[in-house]
Amino acid sequence: MSGAVDLSGLKDRPQPPANPQPAATGGGLAPVVDVTEATFEAEVLERSMQVVVLVSLWSPRSDASVAFSRELDGLAAEGDGTWVLAKVDVDANMRIAQAFGVQGIPTVVAVAGGQPLADFQGVQPIDEVRGWLGQVLAATAGKLSGPPPAEGAEPELEDPRFVAAEDALAEGDLDGAEAAYQAILDAEPANKEALAALRQVRFLARVQTVAPDAVAAASADPANVDAQLAAADALLYTQQPDEAFTLLIAAIKRYVGDDKTTVRTRLLELFELFDPADPIVVAARRKLASALY
């Protein structure tokens, strides 16, 4: 459903007096919230910038959806505020149901970053829902800002090593940023945050030398390995990962020997810039396996 539903029409609705909501958990968020058209923007769109929001569209006229809604309440309690269950009575909030294109009750939609990502319709076994939710959470890991701190919690102090690296990056000093992240890894080889940042910085440094016509050059000279690598970097830098991966996989099919190995190695490096559960990466890995075997 990603990008297929326009929820903008539900923004900026008049706000009614606030209703009491379930208590916030240790993560600073209430795990379950009742949502209306008036509160949709704050409780779903804005909240989904922090954590995944499961929008449960139900009706008090449907005993099955009422019972299923209670099961989802229990699942949300397990989440302890790491994600939020937003419950919508469709009889009282038809515009929300229309915005999602709901055709049956119950319907559950996962929203992250202000956009619907996945959905299902009808009552499902709660264990299957738990597994489905796990996939959604894995796909969005590290891409949202996270729940706010609990009231009274001490704010976490920023690691000065990362601050120095980020400052260098903000100033355009890619060499300095790379050295700073490398120093963290030298001291802590298992630091995943530093490793991910170092990969990003090295990609940014490499893409600085890519010519503006790199994609056209690669198309004109498909036997040129370096041209294919540069074109893939250019596509990825302009937010076209699917096209970048497709280009390199096509090159892998054409090449043999060292050229094939070089392109495969670069493709795997590009995969590492993303969450392993990202659907684009998962699909590209399947295509790579097919191209190799």
Image (cartoon, rainbow, N blue to C red):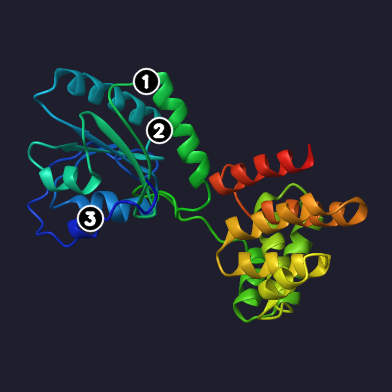
Marked residue nearer the N-terminal end (2 or 3)? 3
Q: Which mark is residue 210?
A: none
Mark 1 nearby-residue class (10 Å; few <14, some 14–19, many ≥20)? some
What amino acid type should be assigned to the residue bearing mark 3?
Glu
Q: Which mark is residue 79?
A: 2
The residue that mark 1 highlights is 126
Q: Are marks 2 and 3 in contact (CB under 8 Å)?
A: no
Q: Position of residue 273 (x, y in %)?
A: 65, 56
Q: Residue at x 45, y 53 (%)?
A: 144
The quadrant holding residue 266 is bottom right
Marked residue nearer the N-terminal end (2 or 1)? 2
The quadrant holding residue 19 is top left
Quarter of the image where the N terminus is located: top left
Q: On the rendered structure, is 272 left or right of 132?
A: right
Q: Are marks 1 and 3 in contact (CB under 8 Å)?
A: no
Q: Position of residue 21 (x, y in %)?
A: 19, 40
What amino acid type should be assigned to the residue bearing mark 1?
Ile
The residue that mark 3 highlights is 41
Is 23 drawn above or below residue 127 in the view shown?
below
Mark 3 nearby-residue class (10 Å; few <14, some 14–19, many ≥20)? many
